[in-house]
Image (spheres, rainbow, N blue to C red):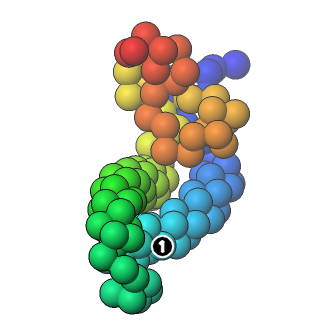
């Protein structure tokens, strides 16, 4: 029996559903982070005393910077998920880009946008 070189259409569909669910959640999280950075909720410090205003502005700036970094990271995750969907359409999903072998299903369920098998990922570090 020869070694499997790609996942079946049924298996790819299973991964597609998993990725679409993660993508929807990731996009919701991104929108929350983006609104935090934009401070579009209207919570500001205009009605507080000057002493608290300085403290609040410092905390707000730090919070916005952290939210901005998280938003950037979330956008990168979204792009990785979208790329995984393209690989599913091309029927190249789940194939390690270093070895050309199938990435185990367990790894893909945990990290659906993975492009390396776990051994290659560890070696890369």
Instruction: Look at 38% across and 21% down and name the residue there.
Output: 98
Left/right of residue 5 with respect to residue 52 in the rendered view: right
Horizontally, residue 96 falls left or right of residue 104, namely left
Q: On the picture, is 54 further left or further right than 18?
A: left
Among all residues in the image, which is located at the extreme top? 123
Residue 97 or 90: which is nearer the viewer? 97
**Residue 91, how many percent across, how many down?**
47, 49
Q: Which residue is mark 1?
A: 32
22 is higher (above) or lower (below) than 115: below
Locate residue 42, reporting x and y percent. 40, 88
Quarter the N terminus occupies: top right
Tell me residue 35's x, y (percent): 40, 77
Q: Give the residue at x 38% y 15%.
A: 124
Q: Secondary structure at mark 1?
A: helix
Instruction: Looking at the picture, tell me which residue is in the foreground, 94 or 10.
Output: 94
Residue 56 image point, x, y percent: 38, 68
Q: Is residue 80 above or below residue 59?
A: above
Q: Nearer the viewer, residue 79 or 87?
A: 79
10 Å crowding of disc 1: few (<14), some (14-19), many (20+): some
Query: Which residue appears at 30% of the width and 76% of the height?
Result: 50
Residue 20, visible in the rendered structure: no
In what quadrant of the picture does the C terminus appear?
top left
């Amino acid at each position: 029996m020869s070694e499997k070189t790609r996942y079946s259409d049924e298996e790819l569909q299973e991964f597609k559903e998993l990725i679409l669910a993660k993508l929807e959640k990731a996009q919701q999280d991104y929108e929350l982070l983006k609104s935090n950075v934009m401070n579009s909720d209207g919570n500001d410090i205009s009605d507080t005393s000057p002493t608290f205003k300085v403290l609040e502005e410092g905390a707000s700036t730090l919070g916005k910077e952290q939210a901005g970094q998280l938003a950037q990271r979330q956008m990168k995750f979204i792009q990785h998920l979208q790329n995984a969907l393209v690989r599913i359409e091309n029927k190249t999903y789940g194939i390690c880009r270093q070895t050309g072998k199938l990435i185990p299903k367990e790894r893909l369920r945990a990290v659906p946008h993975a492009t390396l098998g776990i051994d290659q990922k560890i070696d890369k570090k």
